[in-house]
C-alpha cells in the first residue's frame, strides 16, 4: 500500500490529450504498465486483486496497443490504454513491484536518455525466466521467449548492448541495484531470492 500523499484527489486522463504521443512513447508507457502487473502478480505479496487486475491490463494492452501504434488518433485505443495504466497502478499498489523496476532504475540513471518503459522491456524476458524457473508447472524458457516475441511485435527489439552497455558494466549495475536507496524494498518482494548472482544474471542475459 502506497502513501496517501502521493495520490491526487482527482485525476482526469483525457485520451484526446494523448493523440500526439509518439509511437515510441506509446509503446514504452504500455510496456511499463505490463511490467507493473507482471511484478504485482508474481511478488511475494501478490493477491487475487493484483492478479485479476494484471490479467485485465495484459488483455487491454494486447488488444489496444497495436491499434494505437497504427493510428495514434484512435480515441478508443487511447482510452483503454489509459484505463489499463490506471488499473495497473492499482494492481502494483496492492501487489508491489520487484525485479524489473529495481534493475531498471540503475540503467536509466547511468544512461539518462534510456526511456524507463523501454528499459523495463529489455529486462523483462530475463526476469520472466528467473521468476518462472522456480515454478515447476511453467516452462520458464518458453515463457521468456513468448514475452520476447510479443515485445518484438510492438517494436521493442533492442538489448542492453544496443543501448551502449557492455559486460564491463555488469558489476557496477549490480552494485547500484543493491546500494541505491529504496531498491532493497523492491528486491525483498521478489518471488525468488534476489541474490547478487541472480541480479547480475538478469543484466547479463539482457545484453
Image (tube, rainbow, N blue to C red):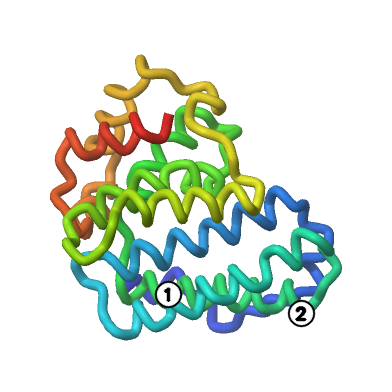
Task: Give x and y (percent) for residue 35.
Answer: 44, 59
Q: Mark 1: few, some, or many residues within 10 Å (few <14, many ≥20)?
A: many
Residue 149 higher or lower than 11, as above or below: above
SS of the residue under disc 1: helix
Residue 174 higher or lower than 195, as above or below: above
* Lateral position of residue 191 relative to residue 176, left or right: left
Which circle's residue, 2 or 1, is located before the other in the chain? 1
Residue 24 higher or lower than 70, as above or below: above
User: Which image quadrant for residue 68?
Assistant: bottom right
Q: CA distance from mark 2 to mark 1?
A: 20 Å
Identify the residue at horizontal 37%, vertical 53% (top origin).
142
- The quadrant of the rendering that contains the C terminus is top left
The residue closer to the viewer here, 178 or 166, is 166
Identify the residue at horizontal 85%, vertical 68% (top origin).
73
The residue closer to the viewer here, 30 or 176, is 30
So how many labels did they put on this image? 2
What residue is pinned by disc 1? 54
What residue is pinned by disc 2? 76
- The quadrant of the rendering that contains the N terminus is bottom left
Amino acid at each position: 500500500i502506497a502513501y496517501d500523499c502521493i495520490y491526487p484527489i482527482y485525476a482526469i486522463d483525457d485520451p484526446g490529450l494523448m493523440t500526439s504521443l509518439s509511437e515510441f512513447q506509446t509503446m514504452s508507457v504500455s510496456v511499463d504498465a505490463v511490467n507493473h502487473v507482471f511484478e504485482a502478480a508474481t511478488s511475494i505479496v501478490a493477491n487475487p486483486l493484483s492478479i485479476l487486475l494484471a490479467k485485465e491490463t495484459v488483455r487491454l494492452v494486447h488488444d489496444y496497443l497495436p491499434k494505437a501504434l497504427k493510428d495514434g488518433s484512435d480515441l478508443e485505443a487511447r482510452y483503454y490504454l489509459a484505463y489499463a495504466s490506471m488499473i495497473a497502478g492499482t494492481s502494483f499498489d496492492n501487489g508491489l513491484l520487484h525485479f524489473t523496476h529495481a534493475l531498471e532504475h540503475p540503467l536509466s540513471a547511468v544512461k539518462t536518455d534510456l526511456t524507463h518503459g523501454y528499459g523495463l522491456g529489455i529486462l523483462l524476458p530475463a526476469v520472466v525466466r528467473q521468476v518462472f524457473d522456480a515454478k515447476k508447472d511453467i516452462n520458464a524458457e518458453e515463457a521468456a521467449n513468448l514475452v520476447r516475441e510479443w515485445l518484438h511485435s510492438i517494436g521493442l527489439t533492442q538489448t542492453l548492448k544496443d543501448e551502449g552497455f557492455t559486460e564491463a558494466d555488469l558489476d557496477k549495475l549490480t552494485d547500484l541495484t543493491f546500494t541505491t536507496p529504496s531498491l532493497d524494498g523492491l528486491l525483498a518482494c521478489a518471488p525468488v531470492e534476489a541474490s547478487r548472482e541472480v541480479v547480475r544474471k538478469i543484466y547479463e542475459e539482457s545484453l
